[in-house]
Structures are given as C-alpha cells and as structure tokens.
Amino acid sequence: MKTVNDVSTNFLHHLSTLYDANEVNSLCMIVLSDVAGISPAKIKAFPETEIAATDAERIESILTRLKTGEPVQYILGHAEFYGLYFKVNPSVLIPRPETEELVEWAISSVGSLQLAAGSILDIGTGSGCIAISLKKNLKDAQVSAIDISPEALKTAKENAELNEVDVNFIQNDILNLTHHSLLTTHYSLIISNPPYVTLDDKKQMHTNVTDFEPHTALFVPEDDPLIFYRAIADFASTHLEKGGLLFLEINENYGEQTVDILKHKLFNNIELRKDMSRKYRMIKAIHSGS
C-alpha cells in the first residue's frame, strides 16, 4: 500500500521539470488533502501514513493530468477564494490570491469611508468570485455582474447558489454594451479584473495558464493593451454615483497609463497599490461626479 511519502516522491519525480520543489510539494498537499482527506499537518508530520488503494489510483490519474501542465484546480473542479469554495473549469479563470487583495481593499474601503454598500457591479465576473465574495461580506449591497461568456455565467450562477448569495448575473460585453436597461445608472461601487495580458507578457507565463485558461479572459491586443480600461472608465464615468468607488486589477507594466485614463475621465483620489509581490497591480479611484 502506498504512503504519503511514496506519493510525494512520485510527484517530485514527475513534476520537477514543470514546477519548482515548493510548487510540487504544494500540489501534492492539495491533491492528498482533497482525495485522501489527509490534513496538511498530518501530511507533514506522518509521511508514512498509508493511502487507500482507490485513493492512490485517483491520485495517479490526477498526476497524469498534472504532467501535461493542466492546473490542479481544473482537475479537482474547485478552488478557494476569500475563504469561500468555488467551482472552476476551463471556461473561467482560476481565482488568484492577488485578486483577493483587491476584494479586501474594496470591502475595507466601504467600511472605512462609512459608505452604504449600495449597488455594486463586477465587470468580467468569470467564476463570480469577486461579486460573490463582495455580496457575502457586504450583505446589504445589491450586486450585479456581467460577462461576455455564457459558459462563465453558468459557472458563476452555480457558485452563487453554492455560496448562498443573490447576485444578478447579466450576459454583456463591456466593449460593446447592449440592453443598457439591465444596468442601473447609480452604482456606488464598480470593480473589475479585466483581461490585461499582452502577447509579450504571455512569453513569461507558465504553460499551465496559457494552454488551459480561457484566452478571452486573459489576453489583449498588443497594439491596444488598455482597451478594457478605457471602456470601463467610460462606463464608470456615467454609471457611478458621485463619490462612488472604482477598483481595478491592472497590468503592472501599465499602472501610470491606467491612472492617466482615469484622470482624463475626471476621477480623483486615484491610488495605485502594490500587491503581495510588491508589484503595482491595483487601482482605486473616486468618481468626482462632474
């Protein structure tokens, strides 16, 4: 019968060309916890813990898929975000810790400014992780979310049900908005993690992102990398109430350019913030109401 140590050794042997040792150990721990129900503490403390044969078979099949670069979250079908459980699949981006920081900033800003939660819009919702997390923590808010992809919206709706929150999901394209009647004109907060990866950025990215995650949610034209930020700024300038908040996750290479877009749209108190990796990846701005 295989042990935790056997699985760990096997993962390191087969995945070391794709990931560094820390990433391999993290993947192994995620899979062992999910499949065999062994806690991370027990995995570390008791490497000779035996694994049931059926679990060992499933772990082996997961390893086979991991060797292709497929993300573990897609293989397992779920990911955690802001303390909540989300279904994920190749129609949606895998939620990331950096985006949790954006959500935390939005929630804390509503509290610190003593604003009414009001009406919130998430643009490009994907799995729904931002909208659902905001609704879960700002219970009085009316939360809506748009996405161009019907497949993504199907997943987002399932995640809203799973997390027992009410979010209004709308199929729409921020670059070519239709049925404006479904969108209010008085949001108090608009938030977005839009596509912002350039083809040049793509060269630096791991294949488990570029080969598996949805390209429409990732990439932008090389000659117009800020296309979504201009569209969002245009929309927010007419759909945010005076004093309303705009939060954006951004490409670290275009922070100042994104700030300039917002300045020209009469946003003020614009703050560019670093993420946990000390990269400028977030912006907060306040609508002047002019």
Image (tube, grey):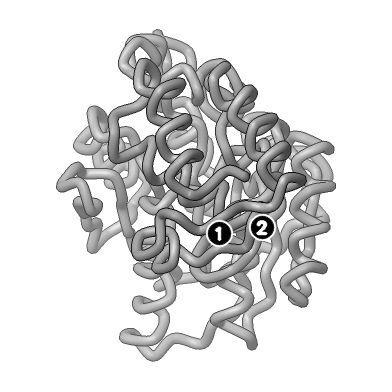
Question: Quick one: 36 or 80, which is closer to the camera?
Answer: 36
Can you name the residue that lies furthest to the front here? Answer: 1
The answer to the question of whether label 2 and label 1 lie on touching residues, with beta carbons closer than 8 A, is yes
Quarter residue 197 falls in: top left
Q: Which residue is mark 1?
A: 80
Report whether 66 appears left or right of 9.
Answer: right
Residue 282: x percent and y percent? Answer: 31, 50
Query: Does residue 256 appear anywhere in the picture?
Result: yes
Secondary structure at numbered mark 1: strand
Residue at 33% over, 45% down: 262
Local packing at callout 1 (Cα closer than 10 Å; few below 14, some 14-19, many 20+) is some
Quadrant, the C terminus: bottom left
Report whether 43 appears left or right of 145.
Answer: left
Is residue 189 placed above or below 30 in the rendered structure?
Answer: below
Report whether 77 appears left or right of 27.
Answer: right
Query: Does residue 247 appear anywhere in the picture?
Result: no
Q: Which residue is mark 2?
A: 86
Q: Amino acid at mark 2?
A: Phe
Residue 286: x percent and y percent? Answer: 35, 64
Residue at 40% over, 62% down: 46
Quadrant, the N terminus: top right
